[in-house]
């Protein structure tokens, strides 16, 4: 009787967990400009340099495409993501590295990138405030 109960419980767990919705994860390097446009509408601006295009939307997000394939996305940090400590805690079990950001605009605070290659995400933040400006997904 106990074996039948355990078997029933196991089947029930497997069946209910298979029905869960998984988030729609974008795989950059495989999705196209047309797919992004279908999802987000037409960008507010497009800048093209050779086969590279920059699609910018009014919400502050932008996509980089090469030969019409989306390579990366950058966006403003959400309210929850604005502190660098949020990212350090979120990635506490991942290998991360920090690098000084040398390509940005001249600011009063130094800018750094916290990079997580395992998850394909980097965040741009200022020191010593720890404020995150942008999130990069690739």
Image (spheres, helix red, strand yellow):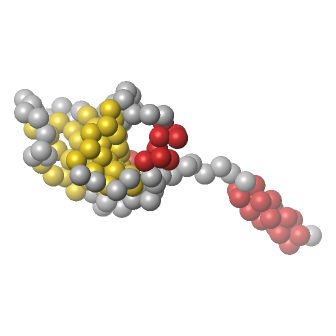
Which sits in the foreground, 100 or 70?
A: 70
Query: At 47% across and 46% down in the image, what residue appears?
Result: 34
Q: Residue at x 21, y 39 (%)?
A: 125
Q: Is residue 64 left or right of residue 38?
A: left
Residue 20, given in percent of the width and then of the height, sits at 68, 51
Left of 79 or right of it: where is 96? left
Comparing 121 with 81, the one in front is 121
Q: Which residue ends up furthest to the bottom in the rendered image?
A: 3
**Can you see residue 27?**
yes
Q: Position of residue 134 (x, y in %)?
A: 28, 38
Q: How many marks?
A: 0
* Residue 54 pos. (x, y %): 30, 42
Question: Which residue of the protein is positioned furthest toward the front in this rendering?
Answer: 50
- Image quarter (top left, top right, bottom left or bottom right) of the N terminus: bottom right
Q: Answer with left or right where residue 26 lies relative to residue 88.
A: right
Question: Toward the viewer: 89 or 15?
Answer: 15
């Amino acid at each position: 009787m106990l074996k039948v109960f355990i078997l029933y419980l196991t089947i029930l767990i497997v069946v209910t967990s298979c029905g869960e919705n998984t988030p729609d994860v974008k795989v950059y390097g495989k999705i196209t400009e047309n797919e992004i446009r279908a999802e987000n509408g037409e960008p507010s601006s497009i800048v093209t340099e050779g086969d590279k295009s920059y699609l910018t939307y009014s919400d502050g997000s932008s996509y980089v495409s090469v030969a019409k394939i989306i390579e990366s996305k950058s966006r403003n940090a959400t309210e929850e993501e604005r502190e660098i400590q949020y990212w350090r805690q979120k990635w506490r079990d991942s290998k991360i590295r920090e690098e000084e950001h040398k390509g940005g605009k001249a600011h009063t605070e130094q800018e750094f990138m916290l990079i997580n290659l395992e998850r394909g995400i980097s965040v741009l933040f200022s020191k010593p405030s720890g404020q995150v400006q942008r999130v990069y997904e690739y």
